[in-house]
Image: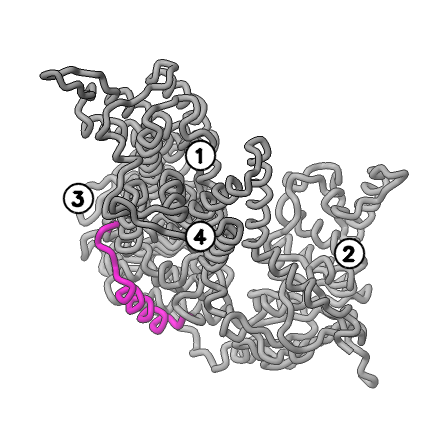
Amino acid sequence: MKLLQHRLFWPVVTLVLLLAVNAAVNSSFLRLAVRDGHLYGSLVDILKGAAPLGLVALGMTLVIATRGIDISVGAVVAIAGGVAAWMIGGSLVIHDGVSTYVSRFPMPLAIVCALAVAALCGAWNGALVAWVGMQPIIATLVLMVAGRGIAQLITNGQIITVYYAPFFFVGNGYWAGLPFPFLLAAAVFLVMAWLVRRTALGLFIEAVGINPAAAHLAGLPARRITFWAYVFCGLCAGIAGLVVSSTVKSADGNNAGLLMELDAILAVTLGGTSLTGGRFSLAGSAIGALIIQTLTYLIYSFGVPPEVNLVVKAAVVFAVMLLQSPEFRRTLAQLARRPLPAQEATR
Amino acid sequence: MTAVPTPVLQLAGITKSFVGVRALAGVDLRLHAGEVHALMGQNGAGKSTLIKVLTGVYPADAGTIRIAGEAIRPRSPLDAQHLGISTVYQEVNLCPNLSVAENVFAGRYPRKRGMIAWRAMEAQTRALLARLSLDIDVTRLLSSYPVAVQQMVAIARALAVSAKVLVLDEPTSSLDEEEVRRLFQVLRRLRDEGMAILFVTHFLDQVYEIADRITVLRNGELVGEYRVEQLPAPALVAAMVGREIAARREAAPVPLAEGGRAALVELRGLGSKGLVQPTDLALRAGEVVGLAGLLGSGRTELARLLFGLERADQGELHVRGAPERVDKPARAVALGMALMPEDRKTDGIVGELSLRENIVLALQARRGVLRNLTAQEQSQLAEGFVRALGIKTASLDTPIAQLSGGNQQKALLARWLATKPSLLILDEPTRGIDVAAKQEVMDEILRLAGEGMAVLFISSEIDEVVRVAQRIAVLRDRRKVGELPAGSQEHDVYRMIAEES
């Protein structure tokens, strides 16, 4: 009974169900193999594939907890990827008869710059929401639209291809047998979980999200907390942007991170964090990202044609959402029990 | 009084628990046609819960509800309304952006050939309001009328569904005397027409003015049902509290030697354009200063200005002799101030957070994000206050929104006491709580002042200010008009308010 009431119960059930269906459809789904010291298999693919979305969803969780929303994260993913790809680029240099690719700027500098630009995007959003007092969806809509343009400016309207091999590690590398993007997302998750539960940050964010006026009156820097939540969300999107551009070894201002904001919001919601703000669950959002990735995997393994892919996804998400709604479950339970009409019941 | 008539409404053995806390235990209630019945009890006695069970907001765990002998089980307020039970709540729950007539008929507009029959609707609304001797333009928006009129509209709505039972949950708390008098006229007329009226209030004198019988609850249990003449006020209070309350403390405040002590907080011409005129006020450790004035005189605004919720654009604020700029509450808290806001729900509690988290919030805010109180430290702190202030709760992890109003108020007090403030500002701390709890609050204020805290006490009930304050600052039209010493009487305050106006 207690297990049933745990906030992560339904998200976990959903994920397990999806994995089970995957396993039923594809007999090799659960198989894991070690090759060249790396772990291979569908499950590893899902962990790797879910990493960018997971990163974005983690940042989004904090913003949603403060009663906000950030629909510019997809554009920020493209901007960060664009900055990194442009700064690294790579040109063929022949040195002592050996041809190597050399980056335009040192890679660490490029990564720092990309993340700084992403954090700056978050700061812009945060300032509009916290100090200007704009509605979050409108404030971030500005950057959602303009951000694509900025990304195009950075990439000069082209798809920038990266030739500098060390950069590929971010999206494709392995470390201790596990895919690096997954480790990156896990590290961000652990740092956040520590910050949120071992400092008072979690309490402050929830208080601001539930009742900003009361939080302000109790002496909390409500605006500053909101501002930093957006900065952090931008930063997370920036990390995701690095992973995405590294995975595909290029930066596409038009399509990188497209509609990712919606998947991220969906992941947060699937994880049991309410869009009205307040109580939030980072673990829930991580599970939400895994659910979405597993679902995508399932749809592909069913061989659904790409044209109707989104419709199938929407249908499954709808069913999952219904299952997770307490109202819906109560109605189902009542229908199953068939209550007697009031008069008979009292007699 | 020969034959006992069947009650219109009869509740028997109503029991209701919320996650471990028993809110109602076997409560009975009888309501006869043509009577006004007062439901009395302290905060947390179970009045609200009983009304919510009766009107179908919560299902009862056990017990029966009968209307005219017929067992019913209301599933929702709408269902209860169909069964003849209408409720008018403390906060008017109508739609301010609809017209008066639309509000009265919302959800069941009279129709003619599929179209809404506006004329008929307006005529019927006028007829209904005429029964309440109210003659207003029913096509205007509800929000263009004062609360008292809105309340009448709510009653008219209740009448329109031909209610047999009318439940009024603290209808008078936001009305002035004249409006209360008119409401009572209406209630008497409805009673004489045979309606059964259940009336919940905190004002004892109103009970004796209007009620025929009284049912008293305490700690979720029925104390008894009395005819009003059998239960004089002291007996009623004793029944509610469960003990004879100590004779009212008279002239407890002792005047302080003037200028004997340096001011802890001093306002020198502090003001804000359009909000509060420049004000001088000194607050000293161990002293209770009352802030008296009529509604709109600037009491709350002055408190908000002092606490940094509003920005001062003139004058100075000195704390412990040093000039300070308090432009946000965090700064005020850092200087040792605490403010219990007037509106507990919107400015006070953080509803979905637990009682424990609500209690530690201000202290944690003051310590900053990094110097985190561990779960154990939080629990110890909260536990201590729960015991010291007698907060009733199932556990420390219960969301504060589930606590009763009085217990929420105590939890907010605990939140501030945890920061060990040197100045405590209380804005209407006694609003909406019953007599015994009011006495408790005032005793607590005097105790805190006795321990050396400076207290600024704001109340619209001038008798309370006079009783508890050692010095009274009187406000009128957003301006301080003077100060009165301890031992002043209510009429002294009124005279000062009335002077020069």
Tell me the amino acid under the disc marked 1. Met
Above or below for A328 versus A157: below
Circle nearer the N terminus (3, 4): 3
Look at the image and say whether residue A69 sits in the magenta stretch. Answer: no
List the residue tagged with mark 1: A260
Mark 4: secondary structure: loop
To the question of a shared chain for discs 4 and 2, the answer is yes
Circle nearer the N terminus (3, 2): 2
Disc 2 crowd rating (10 Å Cα; few below 14, some 14-19, many 20+) is: many
Mark 3: secondary structure: strand
What is the basis of the colouring in this image?
one colour
Tell me the amino acid under the disc marked 4. Glu
To the question of a shared chain for discs 1 and 4, the answer is no
Query: Gap between marks 1 and 4, in whole Å?
Result: 44 Å
Above or below for B325 versus B429: above
The reply to whether the C-beta atoms of the residues labelled 3 and 2 are less than 8 Å apart is: no
Q: Which span is picked out in magenta?
A: B368-391
Residue at image location 34% in from the left, 59% down from the top = B415
- Closer-to-camera residue (B209/A42): A42
